[in-house]
Amino acid sequence: MEWIADSSAGSWLRERLDEKHETMHGVVPRGFRAYARVFHPASVRSLPGRAMPSWDELDRMPDSDRDALFGQYVDEPATWAEAAAAYGTVLHPQAQWGRIVRTPAGDDWRSRIAPDGRQFDAPGEGEMEPALLAAIARHLVGHTSTPDAGFAAVWEGWGGLIGHLGRTATPALMSDDPAHLEMLQRSIHDPFNDAFRKPRWLPGILSDEVSNGPRLELPDREYVLFSAAPSAFADPHWILDAPWRNVESERQGFPPSAQHPSILWPADRAWVLVSEIDFDSTVIAGSPALVAAICADPDIEALPLPENARLTWDADEVNR
């Protein structure tokens, strides 16, 4: 995987996208025979033998009781179909999470307690686990003539990905000495002293060359473009080879991590995978055979998606 300064390899995407976002084709290219929607996994939290308490109940509990209760929580991944069954709703291609979990107007749809007492938490938007991408990629590589040549576009806005001009915390915020604090605050507001006013370059995960380089520009989004073999993503350990891998976090003791590509396609353009940052699902455009294979895989929760499908929050006309 290597950075590509010439973003023209992705210009065909722009030509197939709608200018407006009335349908999924604001981010998903037109011109393919079939589409699949892969639902990002949600999560479910339960308490053995009792219903999950509401936030109000937790607030009224003594600290010791609340801490003991937290230790009994059981957290597991959950499918959209499981959530629909718990709430008595219907999973369908254009289902929206807020309506699957029957969220009243104005309430928080991200965390809801079902009638059976379990708490369902919303799927991640714009991201999925490496294992899920690997399961999808194992189908993708079988439906292209160029499994070892392709492109990956990563949205530039993921936190810490690229370097930028900004300000770090000032010493004033970190001083316990009142006299020192007063002096620093005067310096900050002194128009002749820009020691704390001048932005500085803050490095990102990617090099300064990449951070300052050209982008793949699509409607309302800009991406850093890389050459990338689709076959590489069939292994969940692809993150170890990704140039955008967060090595700094590993130095601090965190496990290896890397945001999965926002857009992925092979050199022959037989298909394209799109994980829009505001979508709680990933859309794959390709052949009917590819879509059928993905939707039939028990390790992937997916449904065929019609052309011109809407995936906005109000698109679910079944679960009203």
Image (cartoon, rainbow, N blue to C red):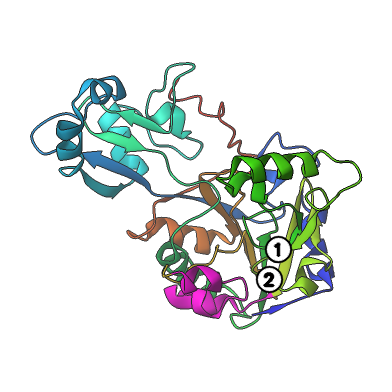
Q: Quick check: is 299 in the magenta stretch?
A: no
**Which region is colored magenta?**
227-252
Quadrant holding the C terminus: top left
* Residue drawn at point x = 52 percent, y = 46 percent: 125
SS at mark 2?
loop
* Residue drawn at point x = 55 percent, y = 62 percent: 259
Q: Earlier in the sequence, mark 2 or mark 1?
A: 1
The residue under label 2 is 206
In the displayed orientation, state which residue is furthest to the top: 105
Q: Is residue 17 left or right of residue 297?
A: right
SS at mark 1?
loop
What kind of residue is marked 1?
Ile
Question: Observer-nearest residue: 146 or 57?
Answer: 57
For the stretch drawn in magenta, the main secondary structure is helix
What kind of residue is marked 2?
Leu
Does residue 136 lie above or below 145 as drawn?
above
- Residue 4 visible? The answer is yes
Question: Observer-nearest residue: 140 or 256?
Answer: 256
* Residue drawn at point x = 60 percent, y = 63 percent: 261
Give the quadrant of residue 247. bottom right
Please state the horizontal and vertical placement of residue 221, each as a whole percent of the image.
Answer: 75, 50
Q: Is residue 90 left or right of residue 6?
A: left
**Residue 82's mark?**
none
Quadrant holding the N terminus: bottom right
Q: Is residue 104 left or right of residue 154?
A: left
The residue under label 1 is 162
